[in-house]
Image (cartoon, rainbow, N blue to C red):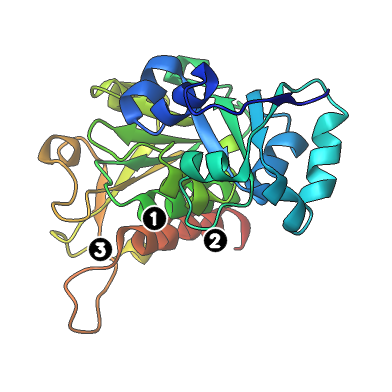
Amino acid sequence: MKAKLISSENNAIIKYIKSLRLKKQRTKNLQFIVEGVRIVDECLRHNVDIEYIVYSKDLHKVRNGTDLLNRISEKDYIIYEVSDKLFIKLAATESPQGIMAVVNMRNITLEDLELREDKKLFFVILDRIQDPGNMGTIIRTSEGAGVDALIMTKGSVDPYNDKVLRATMGAVFYLPIIQCEDDTWIKYLKKKNVKLIAADLDTDKIYVDINYDKNIGIVIGNEANGIDKKILSDVDEKVIIPILGKVESLNAAIAAGILIYKVVEDRYLK
């Protein structure tokens, strides 16, 4: 499809893209922005629901940029070309590569999940994780470990924040992400016989001392305050990852990675 040229910063499309930098607009419109050759290419290869694509001539200077644009042009995507100067005003990165896409969210709920009956269930629950890098890393790790879905409690950083999206390296497109405003997720997982295991400092039980070869939900808490007390009262096990040095705790993404791959070890590597 031939690209349509946009030259004015006052164009409605340009204004709308700028508005999607705000979480409330992403939530309202169920759309978000991805930026850069690699992540737009991921969208194409995995048939992500793209609303439209915007590029500038700078794209041709980037490795694989021209090839990506040629593949986009061969399909039925809506494409807009803007000047390099205008693209820089739209971009969130310091050195933009000249391409971005507006993508439709999947907006999955717990009831939408298609869970296999012949497979042990595996969930990761993030309670008010705030750091975009931590969030993105945990999403990427969860997808790599075959997690069925990632559940986020109210107060967590937006998974469609630009920094989170970059840290996921495309994993956000494959892993079901469910944002919960209340504690209905606890009732849902209990009904599915999911054992909730919380990473917590207030316990003597070391994480390696329990069996993960069953329906499991790993709960990781807020970087500063840990897991909410109400959630802790509903978990089945609290475990600690030993600290041998002088620091008081591990980074949330590191702790999540250790527990997530302990599940992988117990299920597949023993």
Dot 3 or dot 2, earlier in sequence:
3
Residue kind at label 3, given as amino acid type? Ile
Q: Position of residue 51 (x, y in %)?
A: 63, 21
The residue wearing badge 3 is: 240
Secondary structure of the residue carrying tag 1 is: helix
Q: Dot 3, crowdedness within 10 Å: few (<14), some or many (≥20)?
A: many
Within 10 Å of disc 1 (Cα), the crowding (few <14, some 14-19, many 20+) is some
Say which of 246 and 207 sits in front: 246
216 sits left or right of 251 in the view: right
Q: In the image as oriented, which residue stretches furthest toward the front?
A: 8
Which residue does the image show at 49% across and 38% down from the upper left?
Answer: 90
Give residue 182's position: percent from left, percent from top.
23, 22
Q: Is residue 223 visible?
A: yes
- Whole-number angstrom distance, CA of label 1 to CA of label 2: 25 Å
> Where 106 falls versus 247 (above or below)?
above
The image's mark for residue 133 is 1
Q: Residue furthest bottom?
A: 245
Q: Which amino acid, by three-letter code, is at mark 1?
A: Gly
Cα gap from disc 1 to disc 3, whole angstroms: 23 Å
Left or right of residue 203, residue 125 in this image: right
Q: CA distance from mark 3 to mark 2?
A: 17 Å
- Would you name the residue on which mark 2 appears? 265
Q: Say if mark 3 contacts mark 2, CB within 8 Å.
A: no
Is residue 191 in view? no
